[in-house]
Image (tube, rainbow, N blue to C red):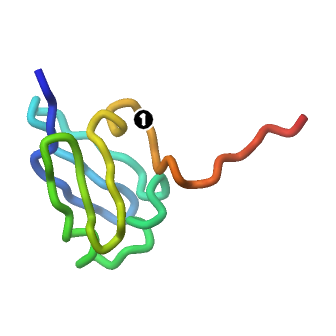
Amino acid sequence: MTISAERVTFDDDAMWVALSDGRTIGVPLVWFPRILGATPEERLAVEIGPFGLHWEELDEDISVEGLLAGRGDATRPTKVAAE
């Protein structure tokens, strides 16, 4: 069974994705800096595809698989633990 996104909504701090299996997952907007900095209109310009979400104007792609695995933006810098 392939799980896909059906609807995307936002509040002040999170993106909410309704999935085809009946679940709704929420992720913090800080995980996706391009979406965090976007206008409400830019956020709503999401294209929902069979495997994830795409924002043409923001150059952002988010897979449902990544959301379910708890992964944020793979291009953001990660903190390196002090040695």
Viewer-proximal residue, 54 or 12? 54
Q: Position of residue 13 (x, y in %)?
A: 40, 60
Q: Is residue 71 above or below residue 27?
A: above
Viewer-proximal residue, 16 or 69? 69
Q: How many numbered dots are placed on residues in this image? A: 1
Q: Is residue 36 above or below residue 24?
A: below
Residue where numbered disc 1 is placed:
70
What is the quadrant of the C terminus in the image?
top right
What is the quadrant of the N terminus in the image?
top left
Q: Position of residue 44 (x, y in %)?
A: 20, 69
In the image, 27: left or right of 9? right
Q: Residue at x 12, y 52 (%)?
A: 7
Q: Amino acid at mark 1?
A: Gly
Label 1 environment density (alpha carbons within 10 Å; few <14, some 14–19, many ≥20): few
Residue located farthest toward the top when viewing the structure as drawn:
1
Q: Residue at x 47, y 52 (%)?
A: 31
Q: Within the image, what quadrant is residue 63 found in? A: top left
Q: Position of residue 47 (x, y in %)?
A: 16, 60
Q: Position of residue 23 (x, y in %)?
A: 17, 33
Q: Secondary structure at mark 1?
A: loop
Q: Is residue 59 above or below residue 17?
A: below
Residue located farthest toward the right when viewing the structure as drawn:
83
In the image, 61: left or right of 1? right
Q: Residue at x 38, y 65 (%)?
A: 35
